[in-house]
Amino acid sequence: MSEKGSKIPRWLLPAGLGVLVVILVAIALARGPVSLDPETAEGAVQEYLVALSDERWDDAAAVIHEDALGDCTGDDIAMFGTVDFTAELGFEGDFFGGVGMRETFDDGAVNPPPGDTFVDVTIHHSTDGGFGSSWSEHVSFELLEEEGFWWITGDPWPYFVWNCR
Amino acid sequence: MIGLLLPLLLVVGVVAIVILAIQRSTRKKDDREEGGGADLVAYLVLALSMGVAGFALAHLVSTAFPGDRFVFDPTENLSASVSALVVSLPFAVYFWRRQAQRRVQFPGSVGWTLYLTLMELVFLTAFVVNAVLFINGLISEERASAWTGTVVFGVIVLFHELAARRDPPQTEAGELRRVVGAAIGLITGTIGLAGTLVAGFETLLGPGSFDFDPWLAMLIVGVPIWGYRWFTAWPGPPETPRTVWSVAVQVGSVVIAIGSATYVLAISLQYVLADTAPAGQHFDDVSIALGSGVATLAVWLAHRRSYREVAASPRVFATYVLAAISLAVAIAAAVTLTIFAFGNRPLVGGDTDAVIAAATVLVVSLSTWGLFGRAARLAATTETVAGWPRRMYTLGLGMITGLVAAGALITTLVVVLNRLLDETFTGSLVEPMALLLFSGLATWYLLGSYVRERAPSEERRRMEPFDVTIVTSHPGQIAVKFPDNARLRVIHRGDDLGPIDDETADRIVAAVDGRPSVVWVDSDGFRVAPVRPRS
């Protein structure tokens, strides 16, 4: 790396890179999921997604407002649900503001209508232990507050209610 | 009758007009130059007509022996192939004979080399495709088909092979045809070997759902063609085509072999360290990696000897290409790992598998970057000091990583400004900043190396030869005091004013300090005047 006579020792670059790798791996592995207050809109979405990830379909259905759920049950979610995903708050990878990536609402507007609460989430899917294909989708969960609880409403991901409601 | 005669006259007329036009054009060019490249158009017409005639003939023969077709319309096939033959064959025959005569007159024709290469590319590929289909039918339960294509295209390949032996291309790119043939054989054979190995590993390790059939046929067809084209004695040292192909095979085989090994290592680590699916499911794709890795390793081993015949600079270049690929992969893996470490904390799960995969790729790519970089640097120091491969690596790759860093900086600024101007903006800074950091570090290292190596170092300066002219009455032992790289010239002044004793000699050597100089010695001591080095 360094020319003879240079003051930087040769071992410094590999040693520095090694330390960097160890630090990055340690931090990445040590970070568990964020723990949100279930009495917030974001916490309700997390509760719903964790239930989906753990294949607790009935628990996932329990977070959905009864008007949105209709006659649907956990079994209906299971038909469409996938467990092989990770999720994070916000539209990740959305460097330029995400206009055009958000869903268009009923009135044709890009942003959610005033008065409703939306939680933006990025869902990541990957196959083959990180070596296969991977893709992300941006999902806006619609929520309403009732009796001190936040309920998911609308047609939540993984978009199953059309089949049973 | 008139309906038949008119198209025939039309064909004859077109053939005659084309032939006359090319004859006139070539005659004019021959008047101006020595021939050589003057008949490229004629070879192009020959190639086109030979191509059409060859495929029309194959079509005609398959119509005559229709056993390998499910859907068969003899009338349509016959009319199409006969029409194509009627138009193309006169051109092919005429230009074949004409160019054979012209090659006697102008033996170093580039057109002949290009024509043979094009024929190799088209007809050898057609032969390989048909032969694979035919052999696959023989060794599997599928119906043996495409034998007519195998025979016709095989005969055309053989015809051109005999012509090339009788009249070998004499240009610098004369080996291009053989390299193209070797490439067709090697690619087919390697895919076949990899597929056969995957099927073998599947049989040993897994459910054995991967068939041997098409892969074994590709292996059987590809390897003999590659062996014949590549291992038959070459007429001379490697020219550009063979050098380029050798470098490409070296780089490609090493990259695929290392990639496969990294995949196997990473999924093994995932299985040991993470909470993964059962072994049968987790290692489902390992046979593909093992098959590809072993096949490309075999290719690398088989090409080692011929690769050593390539000149030093291209080999150093290949090593730098491997170092560059390793560095690019390392930057990508480092960015990915940084996102896992500092990106948004997940709502659900942590992707331990992906972290292990990224870390494994990062460690392997950093190691290979160090190894290939060191190997190339050592080779460049001993064989091609400050040669073009090193400059392309440091300056070229440094500019590319610099452009990536600039793009990442722009994205970072966009996110920062959006955040300042729009409170609801949620765009992440981690990705662009990670890319900026790692590509910026790579740019700093590469361009720093380039600048450092451009400036002649003190050590290198001391190693370079230099001229010293000494004007003195008597030089004494000064000749043995100077280092070996000094080119000493002594001018005897013819007086006794300045003989050089040992002490003065040491002082003169120290004062010259390896620089081209003129030294004047007299009774007052000595004076040293630096001179411009000889270019």
Image (cartoon, coloured by chain):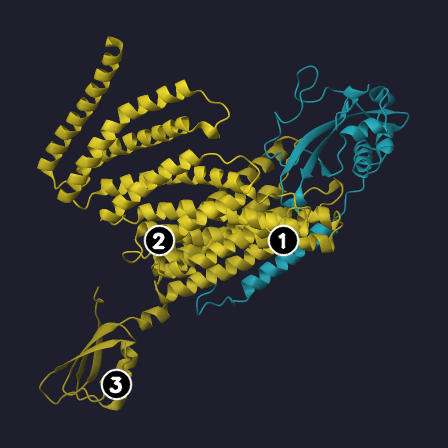
The image shows residue A7, relative to residue B491, as above or below, that is above
What colour do you see for chain A?
cyan
At mark 3, the secondary structure is helix
Give x and y (percent) for residue B464.
29, 70
Q: Chain of mark 3?
A: B
How far apart are the alpha carbons under marks 3 and 2? 46 Å
Mark 3 vs mark 1, CA separation in Å: 62 Å
Residue type pointed to by label 3: Val
Which residue is nearer to you in this view: B84 or B479? B84
- Residue A29: x, y in percent? 72, 51
> Which one is earlier in the sequence, the residue at label 3 or at label 1?
1
- Of the numbered discs in the image, which one, if any, rests on residue B264? 1
Which of the labelled discs sits on residue B480, or is there none?
3
From the viewer's perspective, is B112 left or right of B243?
Answer: left
Per the image, the residue denoted by label 2 is B243
Which percent across, then down, holds residue B35? 14, 40
Q: Colour of chain B?
A: yellow
Residue closer to the observer: B518 or A38: A38
Residue nearer the viewer, B187 or B417? B187
Residue B198 shows in this picture? yes
Q: Chain of mark 2?
A: B
